Image (cartoon, rainbow, N blue to C red):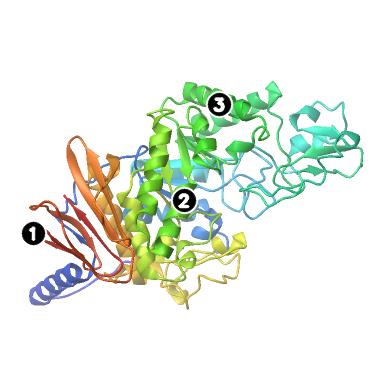
C-alpha cells in the first residue's frame, strides 16, 4: 500500500496569506536556524563527505502486507531518503539466508524471497539513481551460512571438491583451541572450532557454528568472491559494497595477509567499476584499522561513536575533537585518500536515544556534532524520528513508524516492538508537521552540511582558547574559509567573549546567539560561526 495521500485544500486568498505568514513565523521561531539558506544550492559530497542512510529492509516498509519490509517498500519511500538529505543507501544483507538478519548467506546471486526479486532491486536502483541516490549493499564474504551449498558439500568428506572452500582441522590437532576463552571486541563467541556432527574433523567459524569461515588461502574461493562482486556491479548495478567482518578474512595473527587480500579485492573491483565505493568494518583501535586503508579506502570510525557518547554523557567538550584529530592525523600518515565513515549509531549498537537515557536534546545535539565534524556520516534508519532500542539485536532493529497505527499501512509486523512503539515514538508523518520535532531537526542539520562545503570537506583544527569544560569547540578550514563550531554539552548557561568580531552565524540550535564578540550558549545548544 502506498503511503502517499492526495490532499486537496480549498481556501481563499486571505486565508492562504494568513497561513503562509503564520507558518513561516512559526518555523523561524521554533526550528534550528540556518542563516542564508540556499535551497537550490545543495552540494553532493558523496562519497568523500556525503551522507549515507542505513536500512534494514525487514523493518523499513512492508508494501505487500505480509508483515515483512521489502525492496518495493524502500522503492516507494525513496522520497524519504531524499527529503532527509542523504546521498546514498546502505542496505543490510538482502541475499537469501535462514536468519532474520541475513548475515549468513545461502545464495550470493539472489534476493531473499521475503524481500522481493532481483528485478525489484534493479528497479529500485534505477529510481534511486534518477534521484542521485547511490546504492551500497552488505557483502558478507568472511563466512557463509552453514546451509550454503558450498558448505553442505564441504562437510561430506575430505575428498570433496568443496572441502578446501572452508577451514578444517582434525580434532587431535585442536586441543589447545577448542575451548577458546578470549572475548573480542566484535564477538562474544568463545568457541570458534565446531563439530559438524561426525566428531573427527572440526571447521572454523569465528562468529558461531552457523557461519563457517571461507578459506581465502584457496585461490578458487577468491575467484568465487570476485565473480560475486562482478555480478552485483555489472549485472545488478550497485555502486559499492560494505564489507562485513573485514578484519577476519585471515586470523588475527595474520594481519599482513588481511591487508594484502583487501588490496587485491579492491584492484579486482576497480577493474570492473572504476569509481566503486568500498567501506569496511574493522572493529578495533586506529592502529589496527589504519593498515586496511589501501585496500578499503573507507572505514567505519567506531572511536567516533563511543567518544561522542562519552562526551555527551560527561559533558566534556574536549574529548571528541581531540580523539578525532588524532585519528585523522594518523590515517593521513597512511594515505591521503581515506574516507572517514563516521557514525552516531548503527545496527550493532543500542539506538542513540536509548544510549542517552531518552534525552532528546542530547540526541539532537549528537546529530549536530556528527554533521559539523569531518567525515562521511552514516545515519541508521529510525534515528531521525527518535526510535529507541537496546540489546538483544532484534530490538535495535524494530519496525519504522511511518504514521499513527490506524493509518500506517506500511509498518512491518515481523516482531512485536519492545522499545519503539506508538507510546514511545512519534511517527514520521506527525513529526513532519512539527517544526521542533526530531525529524525536522535532522533534516535541517543535514541541510546545513549539504549547503556548506567547509563543514563537509574542511579539515579539523583544535582551538587553543581555554574554554569551559562543557564547551566543545573546533575549527573547520577549507581553502582559506573557516567555520568555528561550538556545542555546549552541559546543563549550565555559558557566556564568553570571542577573540574576533564580525562573524556571521551560519547555524544555531537551542537558542545559542552571537552579538558582536559576545557568545551566549543556553544548556545543550550549538552555534556555527562563519
What residue do we see at 68% from left, 28% from top?
A: 216
Asked if residue 376 shows in the view, the reply is: no
Crowding at mark 1 (Cα within 10 Å: few <14, some 14-19, many 20+): few
The quadrant where residue 254 appears: top right
Return the residue at label 2.
54
What residue do we see at 33% from left, 67% from top?
A: 490
In this rendered view, identify the residue nearer to me: 8 or 350: 350
Residue 526 in the image: x percent, y percent?
26, 61
For residue 182, side relative to residue 111 (left or right): right
Residue 91 in the image: x percent, y percent?
50, 47
The Cα atoms of the two marked residues, 1 and 2, are separated by 41 Å
Residue furthest toward the front?
Answer: 466
Instruction: Choose the circle earlier in sequence order: 1 or 2.
Output: 2
Instruction: Choose the circle earlier in sequence order: 3 or 2.
Output: 2
The residue tagged with tag 1: helix, strand or loop?
loop
The Cα atoms of the two marked residues, 3 and 2, are separated by 23 Å
In this rendered view, identify the residue nearer to me: 387 or 125: 387
Return the residue at label 3.
265
> Does residue 432 sit above or below 244 in this rendering?
below
> Does residue 349 sit above or below 202 in this rendering?
below
**Which disc number belongs to residue 93?**
none
The residue tagged with tag 3: helix, strand or loop?
helix
For residue 273, side relative to residue 524 (left or right): right
Asked if residue 509 shows in the view, the reply is: yes
Return the residue at label 1.
516
Amino acid at each position: 500500500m502506498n503511503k502517499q495521500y492526495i490532499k486537496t485544500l480549498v481556501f481563499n486568498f486571505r486565508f492562504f496569506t494568513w497561513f503562509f505568514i503564520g507558518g513561516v513565523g512559526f518555523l523561524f521561531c521554533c526550528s534550528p536556524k540556518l542563516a542564508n539558506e540556499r535551497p537550490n544550492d545543495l552540494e553532493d559530497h558523496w562519497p568523500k563527505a556525503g551522507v549515507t542512510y542505513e536500512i534494514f529492509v525487514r523493518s523499513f516498509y512492508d508494501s505487500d502486507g505480509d508483515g515483512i519490509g521489502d525492496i518495493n517498500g524502500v522503492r516507494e519511500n525513496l522520497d524519504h531518503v531524499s527529503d532527509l538529505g542523504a546521498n546514498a543507501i546502505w542496505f543490510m544483507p538482502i541475499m537469501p539466508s535462514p536468519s532474520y538478519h541475513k548475515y549468513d548467506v545461502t545464495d550470493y546471486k539472489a534476493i531473499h524471497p521475503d524481500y522481493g526479486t532481483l528485478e525489484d532491486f534493479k528497479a529500485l536502483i534505477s529510481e534511486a539513481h534518477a534521484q542521485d541516490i547511490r546504492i551500497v549493499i552488505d557483502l558478507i564474504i568472511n563466512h557463509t551460512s552453514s546451509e550454503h551449498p558450498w558448505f553442505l558439500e564441504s562437510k561430506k568428506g575430505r575428498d570433496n571438491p568443496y572441502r578446501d572452500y572452508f577451514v578444517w582441522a582434525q580434532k587431535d590437532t585442536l586441543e589447545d583451541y577448542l575451548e577458546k576463552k578470549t572475548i573480542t571486541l566484535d564477538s562474544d563467541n568463545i568457541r570458534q572450532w565446531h563439530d559438524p556432527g561426525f566428531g573427527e574433523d572440526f571447521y572454523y567459524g569465528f562468529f558461531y557454528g552457523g557461519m563457517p569461515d571461507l578459506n581465502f588461502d584457496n585461490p578458487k574461493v577468491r575467484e568465487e568472491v570476485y565473480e560475486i562482486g562482478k555480478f552485483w556491479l555489472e549485472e545488478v548495478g550497485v555502486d559499492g559494497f560494505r564489507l562485513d567482518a573485514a578484519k577476519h578474512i585471515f586470523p588475527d595473527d595474520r594481519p599482513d595477509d588481511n591487508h594484502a587480500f583487501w588490496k587485491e579485492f579492491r584492484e579486482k573491483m576497480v577493474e570492473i567499476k572504476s569509481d566503486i565505493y568500498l567501506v569496511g568494518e574493522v572493529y578495533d583501535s586506529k592502529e589496527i584499522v589504519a593498515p586496511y586503508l589501501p585496500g578499503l579506502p573507507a572505514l567505519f570510525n567506531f572511536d567516533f561513536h563511543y567518544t561522542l557518547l562519552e562526551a555527551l554523557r560527561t559533558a566534556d567538550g574536549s574529548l571528541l575533537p581531540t580523539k578525532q584529530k588524532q585519528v585523522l592525523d594518523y590515517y593521513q600518515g597512511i594515505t591521503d585518500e581515506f574516507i572517514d565513515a563516521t557514525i552516531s549509531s548503527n545496527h550493532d549498537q543500542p539506538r542513540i536515544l536509548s544510549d542517552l537515557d531518552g534525552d532528546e536534546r542530547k540526541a539532537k545535539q549528537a546529530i549536530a556534532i556528527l554533521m559539523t565534524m569531518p567525515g562521511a556520516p552514516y545515519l541508521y534508519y529510525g534515528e531521525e524520528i527518535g526510535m529507541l532500542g537496546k540489546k538483544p539485536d532484534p530490538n535495535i532493529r524494530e519496525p519504522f513508524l511511518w504514521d499513527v497505527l490506524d493509518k500506517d499501512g506500511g509498518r512491518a509486523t515481523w516482531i512485536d516492538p519492545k522499545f519503539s512503539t506508538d507510546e514511545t515514538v512519534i511517527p514520521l508523518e506527525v513529526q513532519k508537521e512539527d517544526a521542533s520535532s526530531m525529524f525536522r531537526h535532522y533534516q535541517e542539520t543535514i541541510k546545513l552540511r549539504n549547503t556548506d562545503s567547509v563543514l563537509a570537506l574542511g579539515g579539523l583544527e583544535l582551538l587553543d582558547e581555554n574554554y569551559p569544560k562543557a564547551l566543545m569547540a573546533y575549527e573547520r578550514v577549507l581553502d582559506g574559509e573557516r567555520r568555528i563550531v561550538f556545542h555546549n554539552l552541559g546543563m549550565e548557561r555559558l557566556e564568553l567573549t570571542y577573540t574576533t568580531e564580525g562573524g556571521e552565524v551560519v547555524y544555531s540550535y537551542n537558542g545559542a546567539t552571537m552579538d558582536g564578540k559576545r557568545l551566549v550558549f543556553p544548556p545543550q545548544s550549538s552555534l556555527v560561526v562563519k
